Every structure is written in structure tokens, then in C-alpha cells.
Amino acid sequence: MEKKRMLSGITTTGQMTLGNYIGAMKNFVSMQDEFEMFVFVANLHGITTPIGKEDLRRNIKNMVTLYFACGLDPKKSTVFVQSEVLEHTLLAWVLTCNTTLGELQRMTQFKDKSVKMKSENGTEFIPTGLLTYPVLMAADILLYDPAFVPVGKDQKQHIELTRNLAERMNNKFGEMFSTPEEFTPKVGSKIMDLQDPSKKMSKSAENPKSFIALLDDVNEVKKKIKSAVTDSENIIKYDPENKPGVSNLLTIYSALKEVEMNEVEKHFEGKDYGVLKEEVSEVVVALLTDIQTRYNQLLGSDEVDNWLNEGAEKARKIARKKMTKVLNLTGLNYKRK
Ligand code: AQP
């Protein structure tokens, strides 16, 4: 039976975190056999808010290498860098011209992120990309006709926009896109900020103690886990509402050990927070040591470049075919191909 296609990417706004790993990458790796995976490094999304050239380049390089170090297999998955497939931006423009300002201004992510900038500098300084990136995201998806797109809660609105745009374009110009379904992975955990467990762990957080980057020095990681915010009860129980810090550590343990939460709670029953942090440290350090060993092997080889070239080639073929269809149906092609 033909495998269903699934597509996803991670933005290069910082270094890949344990949150990205548990919430996204770990699942991509385990789904490689069941689905035809397309996974890209979202570097065009990485410039939505200002970022220095050297930081951006470092993030892209780290991320592509980490994709493979975490276990994406170039024989099974198509892995590529977004900006190497120019059709992403071409389709994004066509879609932008079929989107309204109202639709984009309604996006919660835009409202949340722009509020902060507005209060600092005034609306004139809100980057336009912050408003329009959901259209680029729609283009990323619609180019490849994936059956599924894995999404976190914060991205649901963007998938809705993608589906609306697909239908709008099909109705207006003729059938060109299929509408993707949202995919919620069987094991999907949200990892929270270590210093403020009411927020999700984010790679662009200002305080480095808030997140664990996959390439962090393991001794630093141990310190970060030791200083993770908990509470004063000293009772280990999974209760995200009242004990967000402790619950977050339990979630990390459960996801990495692949053990159900009730089993994890039993394991830690009667133990104190020192033990919890120590054991969480052990599993995280074991994971990071594995990933970093593989990462360092890959850094010195040409393999990654070759895999990315092959990935971009494969992605380009599909994207080009789709784009030709779009250009034909919208009348942008001067000669029908
Ligand atoms: N803390 C998290 N827990 C679980 N999953 C997470 N993901 C991100 N953070 C967590 C998942 O990783 C994938 C790629 O996300 P992204 O980097 O494209 O964007 P994001 O969700 O906005 O991630 P960040 O780290 O918070 O980025 P910045 O700092 O740039 O805003 C997605 O599948 C996401 O669900």
C-alpha cells in the first residue's frame, strides 16, 4: 500500500531544543516507516523576526546536521532546506494575493507576538513577515499535497488558513490543491520552560536556563535541570495545573523513557525532588550524549551535504510540478505548459 505523505519543518530561530525533540523530531523519526516524510529546515521562517547573519547560518547548519543525528534517515525521509526550493516563496506570493489582511490580523500568534513589539516601538516597527508568515506556511504545505501535517495547539489556526486557502484557490481557479488533515501524534507532549513552567519551552527564549538545547554541554544541562523551578511541597505527582514544574520534569522523563505517566508516578512515589532531578538528568544526558556523538561524526563528513542535495532535488521536482499547475490555472503562465 502506498504510504501517506506527511510534511513538517522546524524554524531556525535558535538551537533545536528538547521541546522540539520530544514534540516533533522524536515523532518524525518513529513515523518514517509508516509515512512518506518530508521534513524541512524552515530557514525562511527563521527571518520573520530580526536575526543576525552568523546566528542564522549557525542555526541552519546545526539544525540540518541535528535532523540526521536525531535519526532521520535520508533513505526513508526527504530532508531539505526550505530556501533551496524556490517554489515555496513563489507560491507564497500567489497565495498572499488571495488572502485578506483581516484573515492574517486575526491570527493569535500575530496578535501575541506583535503586541510586545508594538508596546516597545509602535506598529510601524512590526515586521511584515510576522503578519504574512502563515501564508508562507500554507505554501510550504500545499506544494506537496501531504495527507497530514502534525501540528501543535498554537498552530491550529494556521492549518485552518491553509485549508481555507486550498479550497478558495480550487473554487476560484480549478482543482489544484488537496486539503491536508491535522495529525496529532500518539505520543505528543508539550515541554515547558524550565524557569517559568507556565510557558512552553522555546528556542528563542532570552534566558538560556529556560531551555535545553540538544547541543548544550551536558554539565550545563545538569545545572539547568537542577535549577528548574518546582514548588515547595516535595511531593512528586503529575498535576500540570497545580504543579507545573514537577509535572514538566515527569513529562520529560516519561517521553524519553517511553513509560506511561502512571508508571512514572509509581516509580517516584515517596522520593524527593532531588532524586527526580537526578534521574531526569540521567535520561536527558544519555540522549544528548548519543545525539552529540552522531552529530560530531556527521559534522566532519560530506554526507550531510549530499543528503540535502538529494532531498532538495526530490522536493523541487514535486514543487515544480505543482507550481506549473498553479501558474497554468491562475493565468500567470504566458504560454500554457
Ligand atoms: N516546548 C515544546 N514542546 C513540544 N513541542 C514543541 N515544539 C516546539 N516547542 C515545543 C514543536 O516543534 C516543532 C517545530 O516548531 P518551530 O520551531 O517551527 O516553532 P515553535 O513551535 O514556535 O517552536 P519554538 O521553539 O517556540 O520557536 P520560537 O522560539 O522561534 O518561537 C513544532 O511541531 C512544535 O509543535
Image (spheres, rainbow, N blue to C red):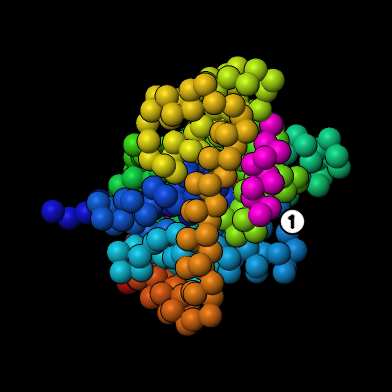
Residue 223 colored in magenta in the image? yes
Residue situated in front as seen by the camera: 160 or 27: 27
Can I make out residue 220 in this image? yes
Which residue sits furthest right? 121
Residue 260, percent from left and from top: 37, 31
Q: Secondary structure at mark 1?
A: loop
67 shown above or below 129:
below
In the rendered image, which quarter is residue 165 located in? top left
Q: Residue at x 81, y 47 (%)?
A: 125
Disc 1 marks a residue whose amino acid type is Pro
Q: If the image is split into quadrants, where does the C terminus sit?
A: bottom left
Magenta region: 219-229
User: For the image shown, how many numbered marks are present on the structure?
Assistant: 1
Q: Residue at x 17, y 55 (%)?
A: 2
Can I make out residue 82 in this image? no
Residue named by callout 1: 50
Q: Is residue 69 left or right of residue 229?
A: left
Residue 247, percent from left and from top: 55, 27
